[in-house]
Amino acid sequence: MDTESERKVVVVTGGASGIGAACVSYFSDRGWRVVVNYFLESEQEAAQALARQSGGIAVKGDVSADADCRLIAAKAHEAFGRIDALVSSAGTTRLVPHADLGGLTMDDFMKTTAVNTVGPFQMARACAPMLAASGNGAIVIISSYAAIYGTGSSIAYAASKGATNTLTMSLARVLAPKIRVNAVCPALVADGFVQRLDPVLFESRAAHQIARAPLQKVEKPVEVAADVFWLATGASLITGSAFSLDCGLHLNGDG
């Protein structure tokens, strides 16, 4: 990239922690400017620090609110005049055992779906004109292994991520040929929400994944970010796909 104006720009939602933060750093280290979206006031300092790595900006916003999604896209355009990639990483959940059917409410389903499924749709819609204008636009949505096997933190979460995978196919179809759209479906990730919310549960799930997965590991956020970067910047023949980043768990039929 010869000049500042030629530097590519990626918008990362949920970019202040976990996989989102890893994606911010990964793109930044490779010369991209990053628009770091965050939601909680407590994340502001981390988001701003991450944005400074790339000469980018941090933008507060709730992806379940369409006006906020449009604001994030508008701030990117105002600051840099372009968007070349969108990484939809913002997500939410509650830890509710699947057998506890009474532990979920309608509000749980609505909030989880609003953030995990409607959010990526609204962000794609808001960023689509600039992504198309970039000449090689790409969207990567952070889904989950739960979408494939109906597992994960709760039934509401699994259902929202299953819908997100379908959304990925629909968006890929209508945004082609100018924008590619794919999703990644990580299994258990270190330093993720499970570890933050319930360290004991994390250790149990980590032991299971290490024992059952052919690659015998729990993935790291930076490893997910590397695959996201490849999908956003390479993978020129791939759109409408949801990739299992599961360390091979599916080979043993594990859900």
Image (spheres, rainbow, N blue to C red):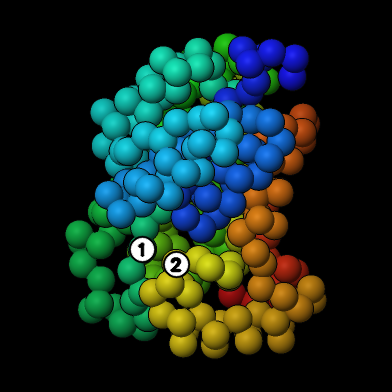
Q: Position of residue 63 (x, y in %)?
A: 34, 40
Residue at figure coordinates x 68%, y 40% from the top left = 29
**How crowded is the residue under tag 2: few (<14 C-alpha within 10 Å), some, or many (20+)?**
many
Residue at figure coordinates x 61%, y 45% from the top left = 25
Q: Position of residue 17 (x, y in %)?
A: 47, 55
Q: Which residue is mark 2?
A: 193
For badge 1, the amino acid type reads Thr
**How crowded is the residue under tag 1: few (<14 C-alpha within 10 Å), some, or many (20+)?**
many
Quarter holding the N terminus? Answer: top right
Alpha-carbon span between mark 1 and mark 2: 9 Å
Residue 192 left/right relative to 70: right
Whether residue 102 is visible: yes
Whether tag 1 and tag 2 are in contact, CB under 8 A, the answer is yes
Of labels 1 and 2, the one closer to you: 2
Q: Is residue 190 above or below residue 16?
A: below
Q: Secondary structure at mark 2?
A: helix
Q: Secondary structure at mark 1?
A: loop
Quarter holding the C terminus? Answer: bottom right
User: Nearer the N terminus, badge 1 or badge 2?
Assistant: 1
Q: Which residue is mark 1?
A: 93
Residue at figure coordinates x 47%, y 44% from the top left = 49
Which of the pair 130/18 is nearer the observer?
Answer: 18
Q: Quadrant of residue 249?
A: bottom right
- Number of numbered markers: 2
